[in-house]
Amino acid sequence: MIYSLTGKISVIEQNLAVVECGGVGYACRATVNTLATLKVDSEARLYTYMAVREDAVELFGFADLQELNCFKMLISVSGVGPKAAISILSGMTPQAFALCVASGDSKSLMSAPGIGKKIADRIVLELKDKIAKENLSVKSDALIPVATSSNSVSEAISALMVLGYSNTEATKAIAGMPADTPTDALIKAGLKNLAKF
């Protein structure tokens, strides 16, 4: 499995970037957000996911691990393939996606091409379930702050968990923030703190 690619970007097309590594050009399907961070003839690192099917092997590249984690969560939902996941993540940042799932906002997911109400509802339902299951595996004392906190704090913790952090890490990252802080501000502050850790 290829974890990441680091090299010169030789081609950028719609939903595609080619990374030159050791004389080989790796074509990576990518989101609009990732492509916006790349420039032809400049060095870049893409975190990758390799999708192997009977008729094709495709490489998907992401500018950061948060976007890759969201992609992996999306394709784990029944009926959501890599192309649909790329479509969703091209229309929103990983933070916005996490907020949609945490707050049950399936309408925002429907703004992506090819995503209907059924699929959007299933994404929210299945990923919320995954977060709930992850909560069960965490020690009960780590869950106390979530139970006693405001709705925005609970949503922010859920959103950070969608991005791949554990309940304990997410809770620690936003500890001490005022309870009336908006959810999106909590997520941003939490991500900054997690980067420091």
Image (cartoon, helix red, strand yellow):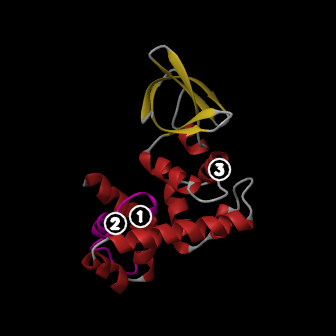
Q: Which residue is situated farthest in the front direction here?
A: 54
Residue labelled with disc 1: 161
Q: Amino acid at mark 2?
A: Ala
Neighbor class of circle 1 (other Cα within 10 Å; few <14, some 14-19, many 20+) is: many
Q: Is residue 13 left or right of residue 142?
A: right
Residue 188 at what x, y percent from top left?
41, 61
Neighbor class of circle 3 (other Cα within 10 Å; few <14, some 14-19, many 20+) is: some
Quarter holding residue 133: bottom left
Q: Amino acid at mark 1?
A: Met
Q: CA distance from mark 3 to mark 2?
A: 28 Å
Q: Is residue 156 visible?
A: no
Neighbor class of circle 2 (other Cα within 10 Å; few <14, some 14-19, many 20+) is: many
Residue labelled with disc 2: 170
Q: Earlier in the sequence, mark 2 or mark 1?
A: 1
Label for residue 87?
none
Magenta-highlighted residues:
161-180
The residue that appears at 58% across and 37% down in the rendered structure is 52
Closer-to-camera residue (90/132): 132
Q: Reply above or below: 169 against 139.
A: above
Closer-to-camera residue (129/177): 129
Q: Earlier in the sequence, mark 3 or mark 2?
A: 3
Quadrant placement of the N terminus: top left
Residue labelled with disc 3: 81
Q: Amino acid at mark 3?
A: Gly
Q: Reply above or below: 112 against 158.
A: above
Quarter holding residue 43: top left
The residue that appears at 73% across and 67% down in the rendered structure is 117
Residue 175 at what x, y percent from top left?
28, 72
Q: Nearer the viewer, mark 3 or mark 1?
A: 3
